[in-house]
Image (spheres, rainbow, N blue to C red):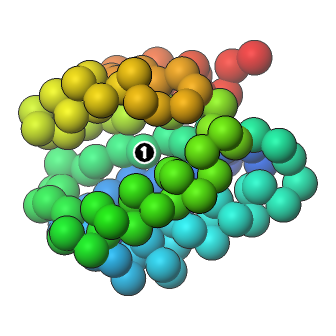
Amino acid sequence: MIEALQNFPGNVVAVVCHGRVTKQDYARVLIPAVENALKDRDKVRLYYETAADFAGIDPGAVWEDTKVGMSHFLRWERFAVVTDVEWIRHTMQFFGFLVPGELRVFTAAQAAAARKWIVAD
């Protein structure tokens, strides 16, 4: 499940992932949030957190994630990925050079720092 987080500025799409994340979660929560944020601005930022109960991502969700990222490729400004899931951390660090915009990976203990960074000028 993907849950939209509140209390972020309009240029930041902020979500937390619980349990198993599906393609439907992307279609219902993340994609509309990104589309809405892009209506009024050229660039957006993404705060993406995995909760302690995160159980993985379905292959269809991975494909949706790729499509969202690529369809707005030059409109991403920053990505804050907050996770203690090692394979996600390694994937972000390994493929980070492909991400259009600045990417930082934080541990769950660093979530407050990630939130501060994603909204900073």
Q: Residues within 10 Å of mark 1 (few under 14, many from 20)?
A: many
- The residue sitting at the right extreme is 40
Q: Quadrant of the N terminus?
A: bottom left
Return the residue nearer the eye: 47 or 68: 68
Secondary element under disc 1, as helix, strand or loop, is strand
Report the residue at 74% width, 56% height from top: 37
Return the residue nearer the eye: 91 or 21: 91
Residue 36's quadrant in the figure? bottom right
Q: How many marks?
A: 1
**Circle 1 residue:** 48
Name the side, left or right, on which 27 lies relative to 72.
left
Name the side, left or right, on which 115 lies relative to 18.
right
| Amino acid bearing label 1 | Tyr
Return the residue nearer the eye: 24 or 17: 24
Q: Residue 110: x, y in percent?
A: 34, 21
Report the residue at 40% width, 56% height from top: 66
Picture layout, residue 19 above or below residue 42: below
Picture layout, residue 39 above or below residue 111: below
Report the residue at 41% width, 30% height from top: 98
Q: Residue 89: x, y in percent?
A: 21, 30
Visible in this render: residue 89?
no
Q: Residue 13: x, y in percent?
A: 61, 50
Picture layout, residue 75 above or below residue 70: above
Q: Residue 80: x, y in percent?
A: 46, 31
Q: Quadrant of the C terminus?
A: top right
Residue 24's quadrant in the figure? bottom left
Visible in this render: residue 85?
yes
